[in-house]
Amino acid sequence: MTKLFSSLLALDVACSGLAMSSKCKARRSSLEARTYFLRARRAFSSTTQKRSPVNDRPRDVKFAREYCSQLVRKYDSPSYTLQRFIPPHMLSAYLAIRAFNIEVARIADLVSNPTIGAFRMQFWRDTINSSFDAQPPAEPVAILLASVLEHYRLNKSWFLRVINTREKYLSNPPYTNLNDLEAYAENTYSTLLYLTLSAYPLNSITMDHIASHIGKAAGICAILRGFPILAFPPPPSHHPSASSGLGVPPPGSRRGAITLPLEIMAKSGVREEDIYRQGGNAPGLKDAVFEVATRASDHLITARSMLRSVQSYEAVDHEYEHEHDEGHDYGNHTGVRLSSETRRKEYEQGFGIVMGPAVSTQLWLDRLQKCDFDVFNAGLRRPEWKMPFVAWWRFRKQQF
């Protein structure tokens, strides 16, 4: 029991960054990384000049990894905490993929209009193309990604899919129905999991299928979690993710966008004007949130059912709907039912990658239920202190 308690305490300190010495060191390292890349951008007058392979520049790669790590820590704390369950050999790839997602996702928060956002999205398209050509610009995410690509084969079309989808929703247009919301989640959160699995490397139809369901659940919850901020956005100079547990601006202060599916709002009798006037007390809003959250929960239930089937050497009871989408190339395994032993081995390799998002999503759904599906409840934006402990236990039990 003493050994278990010590392990949990060490994991909590390591993941949450509660030790003051670690915080000070992280701040210094992050500042050094930022300073280095500001100087590097001035030093490199052209992003197309001929350069040596990235991994021949270890100082660049070291600072790029530190920069990406701090970026993930600041804007995606669950992913930063859950990196403990990622195989060590692919941790650089994990950080590069997550940092890339943060940079692209934050564009909508940082630009004043979609036209400027489109220019920034094009910058990231060019950056991805340059990184895959081993000629990354003096941009830390690009340098770390190019370093990873010298050792691993990642699918460029998946990076571009994330950019294209984020660009499509730059102005936060409403989702017509839950299927549209699921498509968004598939093309962003599920795709990030595909990229991470491929960095293992693991080209598995079984794990991609599980990742698809978990990514959809995570993406749907991300829309619900961000709903209050998008409905009542803070001033442009203030980024909501920079301050954990930030309260929601009072209704009527500044109107933004309503991102619940229109079909669900109509079914629940929710009116936009009521949300702007009454916030979380708008008639029918909790019912609408409940229905959307139920779809996310259904995806997690399906993923768990698949996991149990694989663990029991049983066949999965439904087909993978994205098996033939771009980027999914399973060679001779396409359309072929794999042996239960093969599927079990693939699950054991990729479990840590998909377990983290499943655990963090379920914990948030549990809190949402305790709040009676009041998505405006400030408690939903506080850090989840239980996550390191729950994730460690789930990983040990091979469950999510």
Image: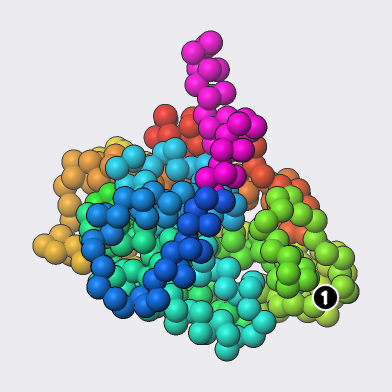
Residue 150 makes an appearance in the image? yes
* Residue 31 percent location from the top left of the image: 57, 51
* Residue 149 percent location from the top left of the image: 26, 60
**Residue 269 falls inside the magenta stretch:** no
Foreground residue, 375 or 338? 375
* Residue depicted at x 36% and y 61%: 143
Foreground residue, 74 or 214? 74
* Residue depicted at x 87% and y 73%: 253
**Residue 4 falls inside the magenta stretch:** yes
Q: Looking at the image, is 209 positioned above or below residue 167?
A: above
Assign a secondary structure to mark 1: loop
* Residue 96 percent location from the top left of the image: 40, 57
Q: Looking at the image, is 245 positioned above or below residue 344?
A: below
* Residue depicted at x 63% and y 78%: 111
Which residue is labeled 1 in the image? 254
The residue furthest bottom is: 115
Amino acid carrying label 1: it is Arg
The residue furthest left is: 332
Q: Point out the stretch of residues depicted in magenta.
A: 1-30
Counting every numbered tag in the picture gives 1
Residue 358 makes an appearance in the image? no
* Residue 148 percent location from the top left of the image: 29, 56
Q: In which quarter of the view is residue 370 placed?
A: top right
* Residue depicted at x 54% and y 68%: 105
Dominant secondary structure, magenta: helix
